[in-house]
Image (cartoon, helix red, strand yellow):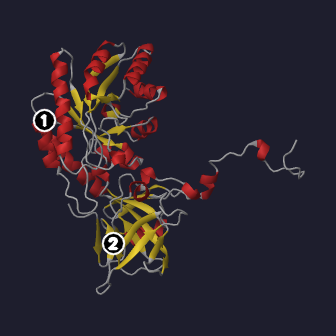
């Protein structure tokens, strides 16, 4: 598959569309996605896993735009959701409920009711209190909830602390040594049908060894539970496959699929997967314009995107590669600069001591590999409106989320009557 973003005649293009043309049409900053990249990543994973006939549920939290969900749904994907809002997005994007899995440690009664109303494929239960509440709710409605018990396997994913989810003490799942008791309980509770197990130890996992260790622990539980006469039909293996941000060499889909077959090949279970970052990360960029260049000992390039638009550098201390939208000319020697946003916090710094060709006000740059957890984690901090999202398909593009206007943003607030202006000048005193 060709690169989704490449230079043509000196101009950075998204597939066949010059990015500068999109910037002129929608303004900066904006997120830009490649249909070819999203679809190519999905097909690569689907092809690798084909021997196990997988249910691939796209992790909606990575990028929840309904156009993105519709794209993956059309390719055959389901959805992994972690809130009622994400469930509603998936259904609105026409993803069939029988391909939706609901995960998360804090599902409210209302969210569990929404999942029952939609009759989704499976609810991944993460605690005994959740199991009991779901039983009471489903039984009171005369329904049966299909559930999987999420296992906390006590395995360190070897990734960032903030996105590790399978260690002892992490809030996710039920400790592996308590799973059998929880599964027995589920089998005896009214309104509950336990159908399998689930596991997810984190995101951005480069090596296969942690996943293999977690999966082996789950496979042992499948055998043990069946030995007690309990039915275990399905195993949800979560996500975890990553993409290179710098010089990492992550496991390939083929290597991952081979490891899965080694662990589960003889167990006759239906397997589900919840990829997010792997599918959408490489196919997204954030395009920003240079506002000022401060001539200091280490030049500071101030762009019009900020930490509210892309929070990952501030939150995780990670840098995304930056490329200029105009291809550097021969002889343009790189200058090491700090790239920052306009928010009044030092943490609003994207890259430090980063080599870029000489830049001036008005030049465009692209933060790459931001299709996952970029727009989905953006906010209106500093009363900065949400930026547009744009989807490219070959030689065409469409705005799939319009830029939020200041009027839209201000209209979200409601001022109580007692703070309304007092025409008498009494300052609202009574």
Mark with earlier residue (2, 1): 2
Nearest the camera: 378 or 33? Answer: 378
Q: Who's the residue at 30% across and 20% down the image?
A: 182
Q: Percent position (x, y) of residue 170?
A: 35, 37
Seen at 28% across and 44% down, the residue is 275
Disc 2 packing (10 Å; few <14; some 14–19; many ≥20): many
Q: Which residue in the protein does label 1 denote?
A: 263
Task: Give the quadrant of the N terminus.
Answer: bottom left
- Name the mark nearer the viewer: 2 or 1: 1
Residue 255 horizontal side relative to residue 417, left or right: left
Q: Is residue 324 at least partly visible in the picture?
A: no
Q: Is residue 226 left or right of residue 133?
A: left
Up the image or down, 162 lies above or below 2; here it is above
Residue 381 against residue 135 in the figure, above or below:
below
Q: Quadrant of the C terminus?
A: top right
The residue tagged with tag 1: helix, strand or loop? Answer: helix
Above or below residue 207? Residue 364 is: below
Mark 2 to mark 1 CA distance (whole Å) = 43 Å
* Residue at x 41%, y 28% (from the top left corner): 115
**What is the x, y in percent for residue 140?**
45, 14
Q: Secondary structure at mark 2?
A: strand
Q: Nearer the viewer, residue 396 or 26?
A: 26
Q: Position of residue 364 (x, y in %)?
A: 42, 73
Would you say 365 lies left or right of 6 here?
right
| Residue designated by label 2 | 12
Q: For residue 184, which quarter of the picture?
A: top left
Q: Is residue 93 above or below residue 398?
A: above
Which quadrant of the view contains residue 129?
Answer: top left
The residue furthest front is 169
Image coordinates for residue 82, horizontal then vertical, percent: 40, 37
């Amino acid at each position: 598959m060709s690169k989704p973003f490449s230079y043509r005649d000196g101009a950075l293009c998204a597939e066949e569309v010059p990015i500068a043309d999109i910037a002129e049409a929608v303004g900066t900053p904006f997120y830009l996605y490649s249909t070819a990249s999203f679809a190519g990543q999905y097909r690569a994973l689907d092809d690798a896993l084909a021997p196990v006939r997988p249910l691939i549920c796209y992790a909606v939290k990575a990028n929840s735009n309904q156009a993105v969900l519709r794209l993956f749904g059309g390719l055959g994907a389901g959805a992994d959701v972690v809130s009622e809002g994400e469930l509603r997005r998936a259904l609105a994007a026409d993803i069939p409920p029988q391909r939706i899995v609901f995960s998360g440690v804090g599902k409210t009664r209302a969210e569990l009711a929404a999942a029952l109303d939609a009759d989704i494929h499976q609810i991944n239960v993460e605690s005994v209190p959740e199991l009991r509440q779901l039983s009471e709710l489903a039984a009171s409605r005369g329904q049966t909830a299909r559930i999987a018990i999420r296992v906390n396997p006590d395995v360190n994913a070897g990734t960032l602390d903030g996105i590790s989810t399978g260690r002892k003490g992490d809030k996710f799942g039920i400790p592996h040594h308590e799973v059998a008791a929880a599964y027995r309980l589920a089998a005896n509770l009214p309104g509950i049908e336990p159908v399998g197990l689930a596991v997810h130890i984190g995101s951005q996992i480069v090596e296969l060894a942690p996943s293999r260790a977690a999966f082996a622990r789950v496979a042992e539980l499948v055998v043990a539970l069946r030995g007690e006469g309990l039915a275990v039909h399905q195993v949800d293996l979560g996500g975890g496959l990553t993409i290179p941000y710098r010089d990492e060499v992550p496991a390939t889909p083929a290597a991952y699929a081979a490891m899965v077959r080694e662990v589960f090949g003889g167990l006759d279970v239906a397997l589900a997967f919840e990829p997010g970052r792997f599918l959408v990360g490489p196919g997204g960029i954030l395009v920003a314009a240079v506002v000022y260049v401060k001539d200091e000992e280490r030049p500071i390039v101030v762009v019009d995107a900020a930490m509210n638009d892309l929070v990952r550098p501030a939150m995780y201390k990670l840098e995304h590669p930056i490329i200029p939208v105009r291809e550097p000319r021969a002889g343009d020697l790189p200058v090491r600069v700090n790239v920052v946003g306009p928010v009044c916090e030092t943490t609003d710094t994207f890259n430090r001591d980063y080599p870029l060709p000489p830049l001036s006000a008005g030049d465009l740059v692209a933060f790459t590999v931001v299709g996952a957890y970029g727009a989905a984690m953006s906010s209106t901090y500093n009363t900065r409106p949400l930026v547009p999202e744009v989807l490219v398909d070959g030689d065409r593009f469409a705005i799939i989320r319009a830029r939020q206007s200041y009027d839209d943003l201000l209209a979200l607030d409601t001022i109580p009557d007692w703070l309304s202006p007092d025409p008498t000048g009494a300052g609202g005193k009574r």
